[in-house]
Image (cartoon, helix red, strand yellow):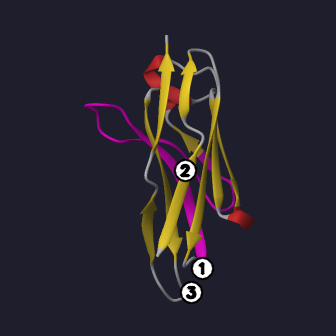
Amino acid sequence: QVQLVESGGGLVQAGGSLRLSCAASGSIFSINAMGWYRQAPGKQRELVAQITKIGSTNYADSVKGRFTISRDNANNTVYLQMNSLKPADTAVYYCKAVVQARPVYGTFNSWGQGTQVTVSS
């Protein structure tokens, strides 16, 4: 069993900042990529940013230059610093981790429960 617990969402005015955190715990041997996704009402879930175990990152075009993803491998935690927020960033943000539970096991995706981010105009 692996649990991902997100925190840091909330209500902020346009132009403001928020920092999301996601901590993974449970039966974990290794975590490969970690990432943040978001889903707005009536829309599909989309990738916001992801980071590999060695720190390589990629971002959705809509957040490049405004959001920064980082991770703390020692504590199985990933962060998303969101600056210059826009109303279009309003969504539920989900954390995902690609987890390997045992050395000889394959990997699986584990998801957090989601945290609401609302940006007012």
- Mark 3 / mark 2, whichever is N-terminal: 2
* Kind of residue at disc 2: Glu
Above or below 5: residue 99? below
- Residue 86 placed where, x, y %? 52, 18
Going 49% across and 35% down the picture, which residue do you hit?
60
* Kind of residue at disc 1: Phe
- Residue 59 placed where, x, y %? 54, 39
Of the two numbered discs 3 and 1 in the rendering, the one whose residue sits closer to the viewer: 1
**Residue wearing tag 1:** 29
Q: Horizontal placement of 75 versus 57: left or right?
A: right
**Residue wearing tag 3:** 103
- Mark 2 / mark 1, whichever is N-terminal: 2
* Circle 3 residues within 10 Å: few <14, some 14–19, many ≥20: few
* Kind of residue at disc 3: Pro
Q: Horizontal placement of 42 versus 38: left or right?
A: left
In contact (CB < 8 Å): disc 3 and disc 1: yes
- Residue 106 placed where, x, y %? 45, 80
Measure the alpha-carbon separation of dots 3 and 2.
26 Å
Above or below 60: residue 72? below
**Residue wearing tag 2:** 6
